[in-house]
Amino acid sequence: ILIGQLVNLVRGGTAVRMSKRAGTVVTMEDLVDAVGVDAARYSLVRASVDTTLELDLDLVASHSNENPVYYVQYAHARTCAVSRNATEHKVAREDGFKPELLEAADSELLGSLARFPDIAAQSATLREPHRVARYLEELAGSYHTWYAKARVTPRADEEVTDLHRTRLWLNDATRQVLVNGLGLLGVSAPERM
């Protein structure tokens, strides 16, 4: 059992005062009711147990990219949307994979994906699950950057190419790593948001 440090709750920019004597204690159940199970789990696990955690309830409950769990879950939902879109455009993984066609943006995402096994192993060995959470945030950032630069589906006047199919493989690999990482943390990976 790892004993964590103090968790300070903040709402509206001010600290939430707690007192056992006054009966103003916030339980885990209260936290889950306020922000949801995924946000509560992710927020508590993304900080090292040897540091004091300041948890902004407004941020954790928000549906914005500033909320780390939302940012990572949104990256997963986006990978699912890209796969659905690729199917509609007849981009099929089965038709080929040619990694020699990948460009610089693709290589950056591949580099991020390649780090996952080491991060997961290191996190388990050191009993530091926050390493997985922080990695997932970095991977989500890499994926969003890649998404802005790379096309998995052809434009209206284009034919489907081997590059499209290869990028679909990369998109789906990202989805799998996000699912695996979120699963390690006990957080869901929604397909739509």
Image: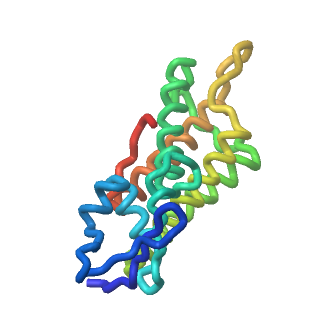
118 left or right of 34 in image:
right
Residue drawn at (75%, 44%), measured in percent from left and top?
103
Type of colouring: rainbow
- The residue nearer to you, when weighing 24 against 69, is 24
Q: Quadrant of the N terminus?
A: bottom left
| Percent x, y of residue 98 | 64, 38
Kindly give the residue lying farthest to the front in the view shown. 22
Q: How many marks?
A: 0
Residue drawn at (73%, 48%), measured in percent from left and top?
105
| Percent x, y of residue 153 | 63, 26
- The residue nearer to you, when weighing 119 against 141, is 141
127 left or right of 172 in image:
left
In this view, 100 is above or below 133: above
In this view, 185 is above or below 72: below
Kindly give the residue lying farthest to the right in the view shown. 104
In this view, 9 is above or below 193: below
Q: Is residue 18 visible?
A: yes
| Percent x, y of residue 107 | 69, 52
Kindly give the residue lying farthest to the top in the view shown. 157
Residue drawn at (40%, 57%), measured in percent from left and top?
39
Q: Is residue 125 visible?
A: no
| Percent x, y of residue 11 | 47, 63
